[in-house]
Image (tube, rainbow, N blue to C red):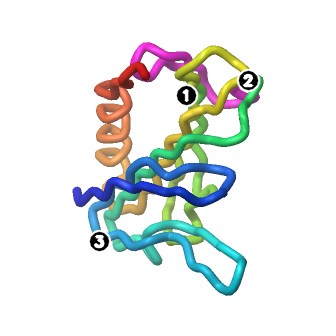
Amino acid sequence: MEGVSVRWDGELHFRPLVYLSTQPVHDPCAIAGNAVSCGFPVGRLRPGGVLVTWNAGNPPAVGLGQGGSRIRVGGHPARRVDTAGGMCRSIGADRTVDVLVQTRPLPSPLTEFTACLRGPGLTQAEKSVDALLASTKFHSS
């Protein structure tokens, strides 16, 4: 997978941390005058493609939300929601995996993980996502 670490000083509702993909990624934000619009750092997933994004959420949250399953990521409480299509459908994905991770006591910003998966090979891609989440570690600040 190719990866890009992102440093963002803008004012968005999220702060991109890292993008990982099986194909090249690009800057997901475009500036037109004073307006900034952002999407995914991949225009369209290729067959068998995967895109993973890690973002620091903003503003502070008071909970992990409803639905999905409670898991732990890097020793922290998290909530995982798997959706057929989902928000990643716009780039050709067949499945979206969203995980919100509470890395600090609430209320605080959550760390957001999104995996966009396109078949064929969804079962193996899901196993890779599981392995990535199981091996994730967060550094204390």
* Contact? badges 1 and 2 (CB < 8 Å): no
Q: In the rendered image of this protein, does residue 78 appear above or below residue 116?
A: above
Picture quadrant where residue 126 is located: top left
Q: Secondary structure at mark 1?
A: strand
Q: Amino acid at mark 2?
A: Gly
Q: Secondary structure at mark 2?
A: loop
Residue bearing the label numbered 3: 24
Identify which residue, 58 or 20, lies in the foreground. Answer: 58
Q: Amino acid at mark 1?
A: Val
> Does the magenta portion include 134?
no
Identify which residue, 72 or 106, lies in the foreground. Answer: 106
Residue 23 shown left or right of residue 83 in the figure: left
Q: In the rendered image of this protein, does residue 96 appear above or below residue 79?
A: below
Residue bearing the label numbered 1: 101
Say which mark, if any, is on residue 63: 2
Rendered location of residue 37, percent (x, y): 65, 73
Identify which residue, 41 or 121, lies in the foreground. Answer: 41
Rendered location of residue 97, percent (x, y): 52, 44
Q: Which residues are magenta?
A: 63-77
Q: Residue at x 58, y 52 (%)?
A: 84
